[in-house]
Image (cartoon, rainbow, N blue to C red):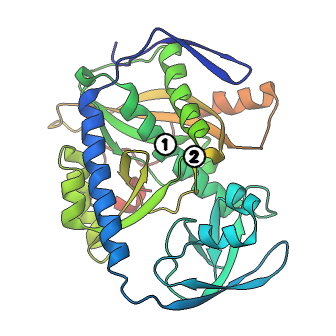
Amino acid sequence: MVLNVYKCVLLGGNLQQCPRRFFSASCRRLQSSASSLFTEEQRRQRESVGRIEKIEIRYLGTPTDTTLIMNRGLSTPYDCARHIGEKYCRYSALALLDSNTPWDMRRPLEESCTLQLLNFTASEPHIANKAFWRTCSFLLGAALQKAFKPEAGLFLHSFPKPSIKSGSFVHDIALAREGWTPTVHELRALSIEMIKLSQQDQPIERLDVSSELAQEMFADNPYKREQVPSISAQNNGQVTVYRVGEHVDISKGPMISSTGLLGKCTVAAVHQVPRDSADKLSLYRVQGVALPVGLNLNHFAYGILEDRAKKLNPAKLPNEPYEESVAEQVA
């Protein structure tokens, strides 16, 4: 058994568990190291702003259009939302700058611009939906990292760009175990880890770092180390990383602002995929389906989505040449 599985039941939305799990101390130590480097670099970048310059942000939307004077390189769309109203902080998933540039809610603004706040009930929610799907893959990685025992030899590989039409969000992993077929209880345990993240309503932070720092962050993950040069070469020497809690991973983004925007969620299936002959670890594609908070489906309709999410997602597989498909493998 590679998962720290425990019996659990979902009663009225409350999680009950027995007995207690023993999490991977090594995984948590590596996560803590990457998170500490994230914090240090985040602080360094904020301190490097120097003299504070003002920028003009023209907010377009309800309850009324307004102009905000914010701080270049420090103020974020989330800060703008705080000036507009508390519910805009709570329910805004993403920002849209100048009507065409998706922007993370907690990413500092760099220039004067127009600003729209996007949620999942907008008439055209496709931009927010893609960010939601990408974030689900990211959070699935956090859940996997926390749930596996040390002897499983887990390494997070990558997750492909979001495709809502595929019916599932994805995170590809490597394990020391061959032929793992998860039980219903193991899949449920992973789903519960996702739900716990949602209940914690943790902020999701973005940071652009140098290639050298990214290599240090992922020093113990050979797959991430292999990916960093290709990513930085396509991004002016920078690598974009995201953090939730102490979990840090690579992604182009954007992502939604908080785990609290994740509603109903199911880790539906795990598929073993072919591996390179030189690779000693087995590769698996973990798939799930989720709904944004506040979007409800009846049990029958959601069951159809769960069944669809069990089919192998057709996105580019992790065993395919990385250098030729970096844009496809790292969302």
Query: Residue 105: horizontal and vertical position, in percent?
Result: 58, 65
At 55% from the left and 20% from the top, the residue drawn is: 188
Query: Residue 234: horizontal and vertical position, in percent?
Result: 32, 72
**On the rendered structure, is 286 left or right of 145?**
right
Residue 68 vertical position relative to residue 14 in the rendered view, above or below: below
At 42% from the left and 35% from the top, the residue drawn is: 285
**On the rendered structure, is 205 left or right of 149?**
right
Determine which residue is flagged by label 1.
Answer: 139
Determine which residue is flagged by label 2.
Answer: 259
Residue 305 vertical position relative to residue 137 in the rendered view, above or below: above
Q: Which of 104 and 44 is in front in this view?
A: 44
Question: Whole-Å distance between the Cαs marked 2 and 1?
Answer: 8 Å
At 49% from the left and 83% from the top, the residue drawn is: 110
| Rendered-image quadrant of the N terminus | top left
Mark 2 or mark 1, which has the lower sequence index?
1
* The quarter of the displayed image where residue 62 is located: bottom right
Callout 1 environment at 10 Å: few (<14), some (14 to 19), or many (20+)?
many
Count up the numbered dots. 2
Which mark lies nearer to you, 2 or 1?
Answer: 2
Residue 126 visible somewhere in the drawing: yes
- Label 1 residue SS: helix
**On the rendered structure, is 97 left or right of 213?**
right
What type is the residue that disc 1 sits on? Leu
Residue 310 visible somewhere in the drawing: no
Q: Do the residues labelled 2 and 1 touch (CB within 8 Å)?
A: yes
What type is the residue that disc 2 sits on? Thr
